[in-house]
Amino acid sequence: MYVIDQQNDHRIEQRARMYRETYPAFAHWANGYGVIQHSDETQVRIFDLCQQLVCEGRFKQIDEVLEILSATDRLTSAAMWLVVHMTYSTKVDFSGSALDAEDFKANPQGHTGGSLNMVPAYVAYMVANHLAGITRSWLMGQGHCVAAIDAVNVLLQNLYPEQAERYPLSDEGLSQLAQDFYSYAITDDGRPGVPLGSHVNPHTAGGLIEGGYLGFAELQYVHMPLPGERLVAFLSDGAFEEQRGSDWASRWWRAEDCGLVTPVMIANGRRIDQRSTMYQQGGLTWFYEHLEQNDFHPIAIDGRDPAAFIWGIFESEARLQACSAHIRAGKMCYPVKLPYLIAETEKGYGFYGAGTNAAHGTSLPGNPRSDAAARQLFNEHAARLFLPRTELTSAIEKITQHKADNRVPEKYHALGQRDVVLKLPTASPQCEKGQALSPMAAVDKRLCEWHLANPGVRVRIGNPDELRSNRMGQTLDLLKHRVLNPEDGVAESIQGAVITALNEEAVVSAALANKGGMNLVVSYEAFAMKMIGALRQEIIFARHQKELNRHPRWLSLPVIATSHLWENGKNEQS
């Protein structure tokens, strides 16, 4: 095994050297920028991607792609530079001058390490969209890493109006951004006083969920995009054990009613105060085996390099498209092995304290405002990330080509712009006058009528127990359990819309994720209690959107928790 790997490594090194020696533009990009460096493996992968983009007619020559990739390195470095300023400083200076004591916050805060790790991932998402000429959607489970999203969005001016007005691309605008981050400012009526938060929020351009409850993005992403849509979902290794059920994603994905999904785990090691189950079980080696056993196709990439993420997004989508074509041709059957990117990195890469527990929050050994040694460390390590304004302007121009691509900005990606309209079904009496009828039977009948009147609208029914015992028999017979191996004579189908699992968080997340369709969750009262966390996160986010007059246009989600009096004799309390 060692000899094979050694031979493969040698071949990769040989190919990368050949490409650098043959193509000056490739050699220029391969040199990287500052802390952004490219391994031989990533170089070989990127060369193949460049050739693919030329063959597809997207670009005329690979030099055009490499120019964009060189700009990507520089934008990534600049965004990391801005992230550390958001944590520590009140002043951002495009000249790159060292900051003085009075330029730092009295109480620096932020999830700096995770945010630094998210910067190359989110920049890569932006650039992959430009390279493909497609605006994909994005989702981030670790909402506390919002500094990365805001930093990149501000530099690219991919902002909603309230942030665009307050944070222009200038010393003053970026300084205001740094001052507002973790400022705890509130208005007279008790609301947040700035259009910025410690987690993803409705001010975050393109944000979908707050992310405070780790693990729900993992449960939702596979149900989010409709056919023809694409989603890149950034996930956390620390969230892997938060909510069980994320390893069932391949069980639910169908090419016929799901868009392309690219899950990306940012694998940056230790959690705040403890080691996660993943690392106790054997680290990433164990996790790769776990993914393979659960019908994923794990793909390792360099989590420190935006180019590795870009290649991974294209590779993941190409694999999923190939599988879809084989299924349509009858050459494959479900489940599809979902590609799953694992971005291996160290917490807080690129800044002082990377890889330590302190990197989770504020990694410097003291506050630069009062500690001269910490101040020197900040200025020294920030300087390694600095990008001169002229180079930043050039990089931004190369990446923000939405008009030329004839596509919408990322702040208006498809999953954030749902607007579902249903055709009203023909009214029919539920029962004859004086006839006894279960309320759930009436719900059952009416839901079927809504579905039959709107056959093109995707349906998700969340079911953590027994649908028939909750008087939803017509719905089950019409829409059927989604399974991989249907049994004859049972209400089951590969294309079923009823998501059944003995995991309440997973089934409610299937419905919450389907904002492009029609949903219902039915459960017993006791089981429904575990759904409250997911519902709370969604309700608060939607309420804040409405307060900003940015109304969510997806359909309201009914969640019915039944409780039967006659069970008291059996279960004592229900």
Image: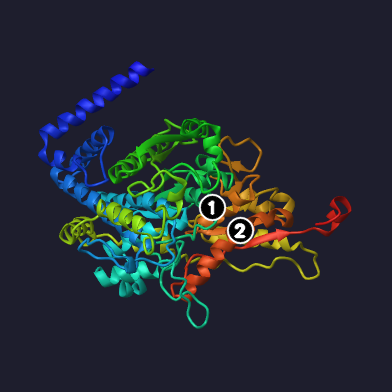
Residues under numbered marks 2 and 1 in contact, where contact means CB atoms less than 8 Å apart? yes
Instruction: Specify the quadrant of the image occupied by residue 172.
Output: bottom left
Q: Position of residue 547 (x, y in %)?
A: 48, 76
The kind of residue on which mark 1 rests is Phe
Q: Which residue is mark 1?
A: 216
Instruction: Please tell me how crowded label 2 is: few (under 14), some (14-19), or many (20+) other residues with Cα within 10 Å.
Output: some
Tell which residue pokes out farthest to the right in this image.
569
Residue at 32%, 48% in the rendered image: 350
Helix, strand or loop at mark 2: helix
Q: Earlier in the sequence, mark 2 or mark 1?
A: 1
Q: Is residue 25 left or right of residue 319?
A: left
Q: Is residue 479 visible?
A: no
Instruction: Specify the quadrant of the image occupied by residue 522.
Output: bottom right
Residue at 52%, 36% in the rendered image: 279
User: In front: 368, or 144?
Assistant: 368
The type of colouring in the image is rainbow
Q: Is residue 539 visible?
A: yes
User: In front: 157, or 208?
Assistant: 157
Q: Which residue is mark 2?
A: 533
User: In front: 61, or 357?
Assistant: 357
Helix, strand or loop at mark 1: helix
Numbered tag placed on residue 412 in the rendering: none
Q: Can you say which quadrant of the picture contains the N terminus?
A: top left
